[in-house]
Image: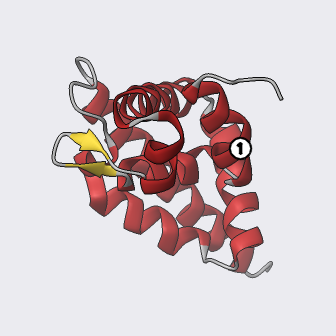
Amino acid sequence: MTLKSALEDLSRSTLRAISGYLQKLEYLAGLRDRGGYSHWGFGKVHGESAANRALREAHKSAVSQVLSTPLSTLLADVEDSTTAEGQDTKEYLKTLSEKGNVLLPNDPGPGAARHLSSVLHALLGLEKHRDKNATRQVS
């Protein structure tokens, strides 16, 4: 058996099972607990310190991935992942938009909060606009 670093294990097992950039971000944000991260099984396997470092790094990476991905790609990604999960895309994006800074790791970097808010707002607007165009009647 090959030993893996905590981050490699997290990336190859847990995060691979989660579809979508935004769902990965939401998952990692949900593991944050009082400034650190808490994942019982992961901490038991790799030790709390290594697990915390890996989760923090993965969280920062997930934010970076979302902020650097073109909106068209993110919209397609979120539609695919919400459809697979049986969720409404517009409602999912609305819920994420309302979470705001909760989605960000501690010390996310300058402008990250505003940038993420803008991305989520734009995705929600694009999804609403798509709904309007899809139901528009042809004259």
Q: Quadrant of residue 99?
A: bottom left
Spot occupied by residue 86 in the image (x, y as percentages of width and height): 70, 79
Spot occupied by residue 134 in the image (x, y as percentages of width and height): 73, 73
Query: Is residue 94 shown left or right of residue 12?
Result: left
- Residue at the (35%, 57%) spot, across then down: 97
> What kind of residue is marked 1?
Ser
Query: Is residue 55 shown left or right of residue 16?
Result: left
- Residue at the (34%, 47%) spot, across then down: 103
Q: Foreground: 75 or 106?
A: 106
The N terminus - image quarter: top right
Spot occupied by residue 88 in the image (x, y as percentages of width and height): 60, 77
Count of marks, rendered view: 1
Check disc 1 and report the residue beneath it: 13
Q: Is residue 132 above or below residue 36?
A: below
- Residue at the (69%, 73%) spot, across then down: 85
Spot occupied by residue 98 in the image (x, y as percentages of width and height): 29, 62
**Furthest-left residue in view?**
34
**Furthest-top residue in view?**
110
